[in-house]
Image (spheres, grey):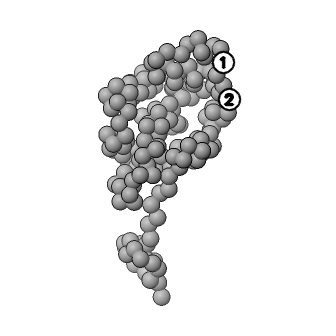
Amino acid sequence: VAFESVISKFSVTPKLNEHLTSDEITIAKQICDESGFLPLLFGNSKEQQDKITKYLNHIINDLKYEHKPLMQELNTALLYEMFIEGFINVTICDLMAYAVIACHLNQLSDEEKEQYCNVMRWADHIQNLKCVKPIAKEMKIWFSLPVEQFDLNTKGKGKKEKGGDHRP
């Protein structure tokens, strides 16, 4: 995806500094515009842009950047979707939501990670994007997925008990 080069193309320019306000959505939109990825990250149509803006307002104003309610909401929303809002590519919604929850993912137990399995699948995909991966590692927000051990003797009928490999 062309999006993966967004971080490398972005640099703060005098034009960007002129437009910065305290409004997070305006800032995000300007960053996307300066990087050349506004249509990709903020949608191609007025309908998509409205949907994205509404979701960003929800994260900022309704959830107040709280990670637990966002994770619960995302886990449901991502049940049948690859990305937030059901678009076919990453949008600023995905990046903003990831930024809100990323530092909390390593603090989850394996059981909690399994409880939020849809969020974990999505967040693992986001953290592995070429432009996000080095930042996630540098900021120490890289997380690992739980390692499930399956008993190969059950032919897919269940998880193996923790405590080692008991195959003959």
| Figure check: 86 above or below 11 | below
Q: Which of the two residues, 39 or 71, is positioned nearer the viewer here? A: 71
Asked if the residues shown at circle 2 and circle 1 are in contact, with their CB atoms under 8 angstroms apart, the answer is no
Q: Which residue is found at the position 51% from the left and 32% from the top?
A: 91
Q: Distance between the residues labelled 2 and 1?
A: 12 Å
Give how far across and how far down residue 31 sits, in percent.
Answer: 57, 23
Residue 59 can be seen, yes or no = yes
Q: Dot 2 corresponds to which residue?
A: 9
Give how far across and how far down residue 56 sits, in percent.
Answer: 41, 27
**Which label sits on residue 115?**
none
Q: Dot 1 corresponds to which residue?
A: 13
Residue 83 can be seen, yes or no = no
Q: Which of the two residues, 104 or 50, is positioned nearer the viewer here? A: 104
* Total numbered labels: 2
Q: Residues within 10 Å of mark 2 (few under 14, many from 20)?
A: few
In this rendering, position of residue 21 left or right of residue 61: right
Q: Which residue is found at the position 68% from the left and 29% from the top?
A: 9
Instruction: Describe the element under mark 1 as helix, strand or loop.
Output: loop
Q: Which residue is found at the position 38% from the left and 24% from the top?
A: 57
Instruction: Describe the element under mark 2 as helix, strand or loop.
Output: helix
Give how far across and how far down residue 2 sits, in percent.
Answer: 64, 35
Q: Type of residue at label 2?
A: Lys
